[in-house]
Image: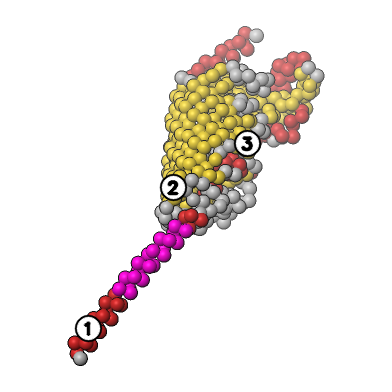
Amino acid sequence: MSELFMNRRNWMRTFAAATAVSAVAWEGQSKAQAADAAEQAGVLLVADPTKNLFRVRVELDIEGNVNVPTNPLISKEKATQVPVKSSSVLDWEERLLGYDIDHTVRSAERFYYEAHSTGRVGKKEQKVRLREQSQAVRVQRDGGQWVVYSPDVYLEGQEIDLLKVPASSMAVDGLLPKVAVKIGDEFRPDKEVLAKLLSLAAVQESTVVGEVVTLDEKSSKIHLKGRVDGSVAGVPTTIDLVSKLVFDREQATCTWVALAIHEVREIGKSEPGFDIAGTIRMIRKPLDAPARLSSKPATDLPAQPPADRLLTELASSAVGYSVLMDRHWKIMSDAAGASMMRMVEDDRGIAQANFHSLGKMAAGTQLTLEAFVGESKKSMGDRFVEVLQSKEEVNSAGLRVMRAAIQGAVQGVPVQWVMIQFSNDLGRRLMVTFTVGNEHLDAFAGSDEQLIGSLRFLPIEDATVDVAAGSAERSTRK
């Protein structure tokens, strides 16, 4: 009887163990079948919007040619082709602040650990590095462009150009397909997303197609290829691209992007055209806590970038000046004794400013305002119509300023000239001449006053001293 009881107990144990093993096997098989079924039905690849803190590193290499016209305001026909080659590295911490419906980001806070570029344009070597005081910036999408600004300092023009990367980390997650996919599925990214990714104002046509190459429980790899026809500030551009990206399913975010592009951009009125090939490599690492950004998101971020933070510092090493101007102004040429800036808005030439170093006057000697206006009228020749205004003042840098606004005409077309002379107590002088068509006066309004209020002298190059001295000597002989 006891033997029968023991056999029964052993049988029950064996049955229980077998049942448990079968249950585990069944559960594993069910999970595998569920995974297979999900894979056959497709998987939705969506970035987690709660993951908003990243460390991003971008390496960018560009090589090609810049097409420079003789005068883009008159004709955009290519006059000179200049070879260009550059390498850039940017490494930053980023907090994303709000997603749009297309899964791209509206704005972000950044702290740059590293941002520099080295290269050559023609025979001239160029090196640009982000200043320490410019490391903390904000980025917002506004008016079809990514606007970068600092809440603390005014960015230099070359710093703004350095931070313009043709592959935005704030648009990468928007490249993901909008429907459930499986291996081999193809999809077309939205034109708006491509515009944001490639830092374009708009995309008119796109043949870009994405393909899901791999898909498992941990990650998915996606390839994209095609052509984009778009524009930047009203200038047409065409980009052929091949891209690969990795979506980490466990972290629910895109962690790696590689992009090869060939871009041909037409000549604009403020920038040359170009034909370049480039490679961009981007790594994005989600962070649990900020290292250099504040512990909490900024609460003072406006819906649009604040106008008072969008001035840019433009400096001439050749002529020796620095000035804060609207970002529509750019230095077009900078040579010993002479520099030129141009204001362009949506590829429309608004105004031009020419800077010339003048010969020194004896210390303590100053030209009178009446004499300055007289010289300005005389320089106009038969273009002169009338003097609209004249005044003198001392600006924030302690420079004496004389200004004469003159209405003139060229072949019957009304044009205004604003002539401004800056001087200091040591006799150093700088002449600035604005030229603006009357039809652009509203867009130009205040540019001359902005320049007057912010211009300061920088150390001057020896070649410029020689040019200015020669100019003064010729004036004396006259």
Determine which residue is flagged by label 3.
205
Mark identifier at residue 214 = 2
* Residue type (three-letter) at the residue carrying disc 1: Asn
- Which sits in the foreground, 43 or 301? 43
Which residue is painted at 56% across and 51% down in the image? 178
- Can you give x and y, in whole percent of width and height, for residue 240 in the image? 54, 32
Which residue is painted at 65% across and 9% down in the image? 478
- Can you give x and y, in whole percent of width and height, for residue 314 in the image? 56, 32
- Which sits in the foreground, 144 or 466? 144
Measured in 3D between alpha carbons, the distance from the residue under mark 3 to the one under mark 1, in whole angstroms, is 79 Å
Q: Residue furthest bottom?
A: 1
Mark identifier at residue 238 = none
Q: How crowded is mark 1: few (under 14 residues within 10 Å), some or many (20 or more)?
A: few
Mark 2: which secondary structure? Answer: strand
* Residue type (three-letter) at the residue carrying disc 3: Glu
CB under 8 Å between callouts 2 and 3?
no
In the rendered image, the quadrant that contains the N terminus is bottom left
Determine which residue is flagged by label 1.
7
Q: First in sequence: mark 2 or mark 3? A: 3
